[in-house]
Amino acid sequence: MSAAQIDGNDEWLELMGKDLLMRVIGSSASGADSLGDDYNDEPAAEVGDAIQLDFTGRRLLSFDGEGCCSEKELPFVEKRGCLIALGDGDVIPGLEMAARFLSIGQRAIVKCRSKYAYGAGGRRAAAAAAAA
């Protein structure tokens, strides 16, 4: 699936079945829209590529495949200009997988079950396991 196929899509895309969903919600003013029509023909990012992300992590109150995370829920992480190498585990696997389908400047909402995030024990358990 190319970025051109998902741009402006109002439906949730199943990246890993119903366990990892993404919906493109637009592009930033300085992003893909200003690069011209030929940009979307570029290959998607691959493992090992360095990419820069802005993202906000929120806990899902429910995961029914239709709704979204609550804007009332306070973010547990907010990053701007975060440089990552795809495949290095710098961010949760669900975010890495979704980033591979986006073009420069595209914005998306990504929802994933715990197995593509911090696991069943949550963020604290993942941090403790990494420290051990």
Image (cartoon, helix red, strand yellow):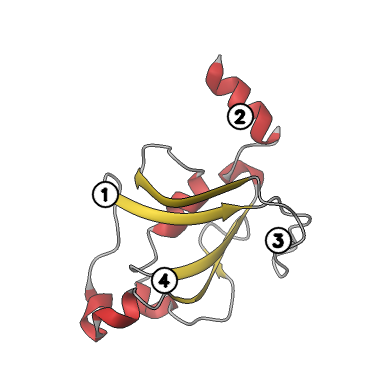
Residue 105 is situated, as x and y percent measured from the top left of the image, at 37, 70
State the CA–CA distance, disc 3 to disc 2.
21 Å
Say if 13 sits above or below 56 in the image: below
Query: Which SS class for mark 4?
Result: strand
Query: Which SS class for mark 2?
Result: helix
Q: Mark 4 points at which residue?
A: 106
Q: Mark 3 points at which residue?
A: 69
State the CA–CA distance, disc 4 to disc 1.
17 Å
State the CA–CA distance, disc 1 to disc 2.
25 Å
Kind of residue sitting beneath label 1? Asp
Total tally of numbered discs in the picture: 4
Q: Residue at x 67, y 30 (%)?
A: 124
Closer to the chain start, of discs 2 and 4, is 4
Residue 27 is situated, as x and y percent measured from the top left of the image, at 43, 76
**Toward which corner of the image does residue 56 lie, by quadrant?**
bottom right
Q: Name the residue under label 1.
A: 49
As drawn, the residue found furthest toward the top would be: 132
Query: Which SS class for mark 1?
Result: loop
Query: Which SS class for mark 3?
Result: loop
Tag 1 near tag 3, CB within 8 Å: no
